[in-house]
Image (cartoon, helix red, strand yellow):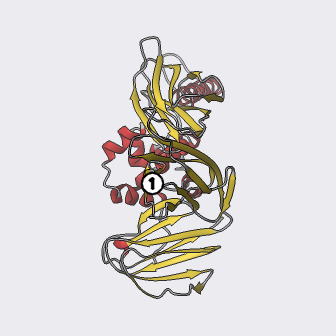
């Protein structure tokens, strides 16, 4: 069993597993490369204040598909255990001039006053350099709103030299490297998904400081047929699962229904789903905790389509770990709260999948490269390389 990994090792190993160079990570996240290097090497002294470092860490963790809450907690623990280097103050010698004698009684107050002025100036400089975030104002939408079209233009104002990034969730869809005009205004058209959308507008200034504003936009779209000619008949589809505004705890969200014979294809959130000879279709979606929109689209061969949207809420009260064997066979053993899970401790063929739930779930694999893990709706990915023996524990907190 491996020791507990440090924050920098987790970040570096996940980035290398995804084969992302540091330069690309810095450009994609709009975090200066020297700060990413400091995060991965554990060099806390090279980082700005804790508030801004936590902001960088959350963005970097989301970019690498890691649990940002867990990593921020690990950073806080590491930072509190790193002692500050002791400061040394050298005594100053009195200035002696020919014919003039300056006594310590006269010199000491001036030295103390000068030291106080320098210290206050230093604090002001540090605050101006690291603590003051760049200004950003989102003009449209000015507040949370409802949209009637999927194409939505986000407008705002910030520093002319800032670099703007817009993220839309669920997705996420990233709109990067948006350059403001000379007056600081910017605009970008994003694509909304049916149901609730969370829009994050972030600006990075030349000094590496970040500001962010969030808005909620709900895209209201009803199930509708869109035939292109009068001869086309709209498809008929009954979506049996999930229920509108359904709540799912410690599980994936099932999607199932039945389509008539005219339906040629069904997609769920853009992914094709097999339709049986009897017209039935079924799949499931792993979501992290939160509210999500599911978009089901049925199309006929003639091009008519029907769109249905369901909004669901997902929550977790335990560690839910789904293991999928892909790219080769793998020996697997699962321990749930310290006890061996039934059916494990054997070789699983490629394509096999199993879900385990408990306060703590431990997975041991003899082929980490073929062992894919989803933890509480988040894709962790392969546990290692082909043929590698790995053990990993997941604890719900």
Q: Check the image and report above or below for 338 versus 326.
A: below
Mark 1, Cα crowd under 10 Å, few <14 / some 14-19 / many 20+, is: some
Horizontal side, residue 68 vs residue 229: left or right: right
* Quarter of the figure with the C terminus: bottom right
Q: Position of residue 7 (x, y in %)?
A: 48, 58
Q: Position of residue 345 (x, y in %)?
A: 47, 88
Q: Quadrant of residue 52?
A: top right
The one of 235 and 126 positioned closer to us in this rendering: 235
Q: Quadrant of residue 275?
A: bottom left
Horizontal side, residue 350 vs residue 63: left or right: left
Point 37% across, 69% down: residue: 384
Which residue was labeled with disc 1?
42
Question: Does any portion of residue 44 appear in the rendered image?
Answer: no
The one of 139 and 234 positioned closer to us in this rendering: 234
Point 62% across, 55% down: residue: 289
Point 42% across, 12% down: residue: 182
Q: Position of residue 340 (x, y in %)?
A: 56, 87
Element type at mark 1: loop
Q: Position of residue 128 (x, y in %)?
A: 54, 26
Q: Check the image and report above or below for 214 versus 368.
A: above
Horizontal side, residue 207 vs residue 285: left or right: left
Residue placed furthest toward the front: 231
The one of 326 and 243 positioned closer to us in this rendering: 243
Horizontal side, residue 8 vs residue 377: left or right: left
């Amino acid at each position: 069993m491996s020791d507990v990994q440090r924050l920098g090792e987790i970040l570096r190993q996940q980035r290398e597993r995804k084969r992302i160079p540091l330069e690309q990570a810095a450009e994609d996240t709009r975090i200066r490369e020297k700060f990413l290097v400091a995060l991965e090497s554990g060099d806390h002294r090279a980082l700005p204040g804790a508030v801004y470092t936590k902001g960088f860490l959350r963005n970097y963790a989301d970019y690498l598909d890691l649990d940002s809450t867990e990593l921020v907690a690990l950073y806080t623990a590491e930072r509190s255990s790193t002692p500050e280097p002791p400061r040394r103050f050298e005594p100053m010698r009195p200035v002696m001039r020919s014919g003039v004698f300056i006594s310590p009684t006269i010199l000491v107050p001036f030295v103390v006053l000068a030291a106080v002025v320098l210290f206050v100036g230093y604090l002001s400089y540090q605050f101006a350099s690291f603590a003051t975030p760049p200004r950003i104002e989102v003009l449209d939408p000015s507040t949370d709103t409802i949209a009637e079209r999927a194409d939505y233009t986000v407008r705002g104002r910030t520093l002319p030299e800032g670099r703007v990034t817009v993220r839309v969730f669920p997705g996420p869809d990233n709109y990067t490297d948006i350059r403001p005009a000379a007056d600081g205004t910017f605009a970008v058209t994003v694509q909304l998904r049916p149901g609730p959308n969370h829009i994050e507008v972030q600006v990075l200034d030349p000094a590496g400081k970040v500001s962010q504003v969030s808005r909620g936009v709900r895209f209201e779209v009803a199930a509708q047929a869109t035939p292109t000619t009068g001869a086309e008949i709209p498809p008929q589809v009954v979506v049996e699962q999930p229920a509108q505004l359904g709540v799912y705890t410690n599980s994936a969200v099932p999607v199932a229904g039945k389509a008539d014979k005219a339906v040629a294809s069904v997609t769920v959130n853009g992914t094709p789903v097999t339709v049986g000879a009897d017209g039935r279709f079924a799949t499931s979606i792993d979501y992290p905790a939160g509210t999500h929109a599911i978009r089901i689209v049925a199309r006929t061969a003639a091009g008519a389509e029907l769109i249905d949207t369901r909004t669901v809420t997902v929550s977790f009260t335990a560690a839910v770990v789904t293991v999928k064997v892909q790219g080769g066979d793998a020996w697997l053993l699962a321990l749930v709260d310290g006890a061996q899970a039934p059916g494990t401790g054997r070789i699983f063929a490629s394509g096999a999948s199993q879900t385990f739930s408990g306060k703590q779930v431990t997975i041991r694999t003899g082929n980490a490269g073929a062992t894919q893990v989803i933890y509480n709706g988040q894709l962790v990915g392969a546990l290692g390389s082909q043929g590698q023996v790995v053990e990993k524990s997941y604890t719900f907190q």
